[in-house]
Amino acid sequence: MKEEGCIFCKIANGEIPSATLYEDEDFRVILDLGPAAKGHALILPKEHYPNLYELPDELAEKAVLLAKKMITKMKKALNCDGFNVVQNNGAPAGQTVFHFHMHLIPRYEGDHAGFGWNTGELNAADREEILTKMQKFS
Ligand code: AMP
Ligand code: ZN
């Protein structure tokens, strides 16, 4: 299933050219046009699913295995020192293209990719509230 007007559908299926690192029947892995660091890549399924909630389990399993395979190979090829594997769901989480994708971001000692978040502290009220709410959905 493809979504009309979705740029990642077009890229994943080769209608728009891309710097492709890997391709199989389910996925294409491309270089991000706005890299957070040198070698920043994206795993794109060829079928359109907006986010991880809606991605079928079979593709989710394959995507994680592909991420492992790609970062193992890229680590050797690029000689980077680490990797962030990131996947955003929803605009408040930073998603800007609403076709599921995983970011593979090589990290280098001393780079200024600036990736991270401000940390708080888990308080007792939040801990109890979250544990209680989650139990209702187990
Ligand atoms: P997200 O914010 O998680 O939705 O990530 C979208 C990513 O897609 C960003 O890192 C963009 O730089 C990247 N991007 C957007 N359009 C293109 C494109 N045409 N080719 C490659 N990467 C793209
Ligand atoms: Zn799409």
Image (cartoon, grey):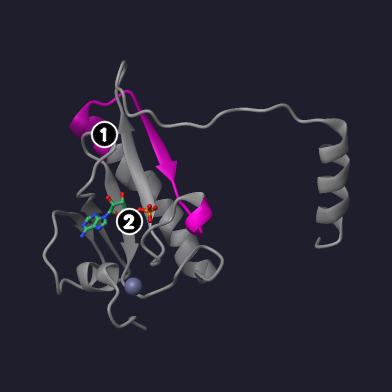
Q: Is residue 84 above or below residue 23?
A: above
Mark 2 lies within 8 Å of ligand 1 (Cβ measured): no
For the N terminus, the image quarter is bottom left
Between the residue at mark 2 and the residue at mark 1, the CA separation in whole angstroms equals 16 Å
**Which quarter of the frame holds ligand 1?**
bottom left
For the C terminus, the image quarter is bottom right
Q: Name the residue under label 2.
A: 43
Q: In which quarter of the image is residue 28?
A: bottom left
Disc 2 packing (10 Å; few <14; some 14–19; many ≥20): many
* First to last magenta residue range: 74-92
- Left or right: 37, with 69 as reference point: left
Q: Write the residue at 26% across / 34% down.
A: 37
Mark 1 lies within 8 Å of ligand 1 (Cβ measured): no
Q: Mark 1 points at which residue?
A: 37
- Between 28 and 112, the residue placed more toward the observer is 112
Residue type, numbered disc 2: Ile
